[in-house]
Amino acid sequence: MTFEEVRELESRFLIPTYERLPVLAVRGEGCVLYDERGKGYVDFLGGIAVNALGYNHPEIVQALCDKSESLLHVSNLIYHRFQGQLAQKLARWTGLDRAFFANSGTEAVEGAMKLARAFARRRNSDGKQAEILAVENSFHGRTLGALSATWPVKYRAPFEPLVPGIRFVAANDAAALRKALTPEVAGFIVEPIQGEGGVVEMSTEFLKTGEELCRKHGALFICDEIQCGLGRTGRFFTFQKFGLKPDVVLIAKPLAAGLPLAAMVASESAAQAFSPGMHGTTFGGGPLQCRLALKVLEIIERPGFLQRVRETGDYFRQQLERLQSEVPVIREVRGDGLMLGIELKTSGKKVVGQMLDAGFLINCTHDTVLRFLPPLIIERKHVSSLVDALRPCLAGLAQTAVNSPQEVLQ
């Protein structure tokens, strides 16, 4: 089918929930995605942090095509060989004890919110400790519960009233957190780096204060590592940078190399709040997904892999900071490892299209933040090429802002 035929078909039969880029993807290799015309796009979005190992990774393909493994699905009423192995490895990586597998990040968030309330109910049967505290500017998902813990009004307003008992605290305001995290809070959920919110890193003081108060009040300290975890910042998980010990860690996106799989990993005491029948899933933790996830983790934990992510991320950030010194339209460069963003003084949406024409896939979030989530195997040559292509786009944006100052955001 041609691109025009595909677009027409979707326009007639899909519920219109996405504004797609004008690209018909047909294959990928390494860090490059190809369309039906053979044009390649160096992918600095990575399927929104999913394609951590790029496209067509030979070991993932080999695992996927292994003819000795024929199981695609068994119900969670039956054992299979891979779920326990994956849970063991994630427990070791997080320093926690037990895992629950779901299909998506938003389902992992839902599970964590339920676990927090169940954990609090075991401690205080009166039900008064039931609130979930989230952070302003956060994004935790689109199902009704996860959406209730998501900050931007544009996501929330069309679906109100939402789930009650969820409050927000200003990001990186430790004093406000001390007032907000009261004995009524059952769980505090936080992204160590906010992704959809514009690549905003939480401060050490803010995170440690949250952990301290959760311990004091018996609430669960929940780290949402769905976007920033699994090697994205050059560590297994971003919370490890701050020396934290969460009660629950949420994992998804790159876990199963592009197949739907998420995990909620919890401490022993927190996990005991669930018993058989209290929570479940039909597809979560299937044999194929778990088998691929084990291969993903095996690759990430090989000697030198995470060090290379850190080194490439440092180089990438240095190049963006140099670009900032050249182009005054950049307000700030931020992020860690290979989760980086540049906040502009004006909207960056037109830059996405310009970079697409130049052969690069990027993303604009929060209207003014160009977000970069490339495969973890990205190379310096790709980074240099991206920055070279980005320079004239931003220079033109800066010139437009000079000519039309009303477009510049204060």
Image: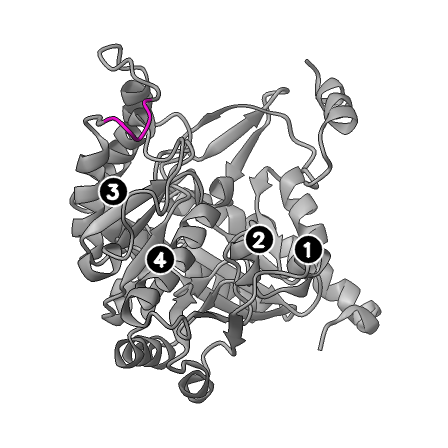
Along the line of sight, the residue nearer the viewer: 288 or 220:
220
Q: Mark 2 — residue?
A: 144
- Amino acid type of the residue tagged 1 in the rendering: Phe
Mark 2 touches mark 1? (CB < 8 Å): yes
What crowding class fits label 4: few (fewer than 14 Cα within 10 Å), some (14-19), or many (20 or more)?
Answer: many
Classify 101 as above or below 202. above
Q: Quadrant of the C terminus?
A: bottom right
The answer to if 225 sits in the magenta stretch is no
The answer to whether residue 153 of the structure is visible from this angle is yes
Q: Residue under circle 4?
A: 115
Which percent across, then down, holds residue 409? Answer: 72, 73
Residue 77: say if magenta. Answer: yes
Q: Between disc 3 and disc 2, whose residue precedes?
A: 2
Which quarter of the picture shows residue 359?
Answer: top right
Three-letter amino acid code at the position of disc 4 = Leu
Magenta residues (range): 74-78
Secondary structure at badge 4 equals: helix
User: Considering only order in the chain, which callout, 2 or 4, is on the residue closer to the N terminus?
Assistant: 4
